[in-house]
Image (cartoon, rainbow, N blue to C red):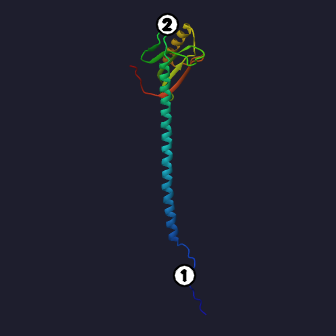
């Protein structure tokens, strides 16, 4: 008796090895394209965040610059603003309306470990001419040597800059 193999038309049939290899190759190609797209999106997001941070820094710096200039005030027999080609010093009103006082602010460019940056120096508020003269002289000294100042004087690196001119 001879057994005969019969093929039924509705019987399930598996995939061939070639079909499986083609399917795997297509999936690998799709994953590669997806990976490159995600990587590009990630890099673009990082660049956009860096640019947004730079714009915010610029806006904050220019807002502080504007606030300093708007609050500039002249005391009797003093120079309210002085520019010597290296540092801009100015006398400004304090931003605290409950305690009327003035302070000295200085702006300059200085190189540091983070590159050349526009820097702002500020004295604590004061009410006497002697304190003003001391702060005015310390601002000039700070612009020359950049040393740390004791007693509440603050020095802040604001934004990168190559040069600046006042007209």
The image position of residue 126, as x and y in percent, is: 57, 12
Q: Mark 2 points at which residue?
A: 76
Q: Mark 1 points at which residue?
A: 9
Q: Which of marks 2 and 1 is nearer the N terminus?
A: 1
- x 49%, y 63%: residue: 26
The image position of residue 56, as x and y in percent, is: 50, 32
| Most foreground residue, 88 or 97 | 97
Q: Which residue lies furthest to the bottom in this view?
A: 1
Q: Is residue 75 above or below residue 156?
A: above
Nearer to us: label 2 or label 1: 2
- x 54%, y 13%: residue: 135
The image position of residue 28, as x and y in percent, is: 51, 60
- x 49%, y 58%: residue: 30
Q: Give the total of numbered labels.
A: 2
For marks 2 and 1, give the CA distance. Answer: 108 Å
Q: In this view, does 148 lie to the left or right of 81?
A: right
| Most foreground residue, 23 or 70 | 70
Residue 117 visible (yes or no): no
Query: Callout 2: 10 Å neighbours few (<14), some, many (20+)?
Result: few
| Most foreground residue, 110 or 123 | 123
Location of residue 167 by image quarter: top left
The image position of residue 52, as x and y in percent, is: 49, 36
- x 60%, y 15%: residue: 99
Contact, mark 2 vs mark 1 (Cβ under 8 Å): no
Element at badge 2? loop
């Amino acid at each position: 008796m001879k057994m005969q193999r019969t093929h039924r038309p509705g019987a399930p049939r598996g995939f061939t090895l070639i079909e499986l290899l083609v399917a795997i190759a297509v999936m690998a190609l799709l994953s590669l394209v997806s990976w490159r797209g995600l990587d590009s999106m990630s890099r673009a997001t990082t660049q956009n965040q860096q640019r947004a941070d730079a714009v915010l820094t610029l806006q904050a710096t220019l807002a502080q610059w504007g606030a300093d200039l708007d609050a500039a005030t002249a005391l009797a027999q003093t120079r309210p603003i002085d520019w010597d080609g290296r540092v801009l010093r100015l006398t400004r009103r304090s931003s605290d309306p409950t305690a009327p006082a003035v302070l000295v602010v200085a702006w300059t460019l200085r190189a540091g470990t983070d590159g050349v940056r526009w820097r702002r120096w500020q004295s604590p508020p004061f009410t006497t001419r002697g304190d003003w003269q001391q702060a005015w002289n310390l601002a000039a000294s700070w612009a020359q040597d950049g040393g740390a100042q004791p007693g509440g004087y603050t020095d802040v690196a604001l934004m990168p800059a190559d040069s600046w001119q006042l007209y």
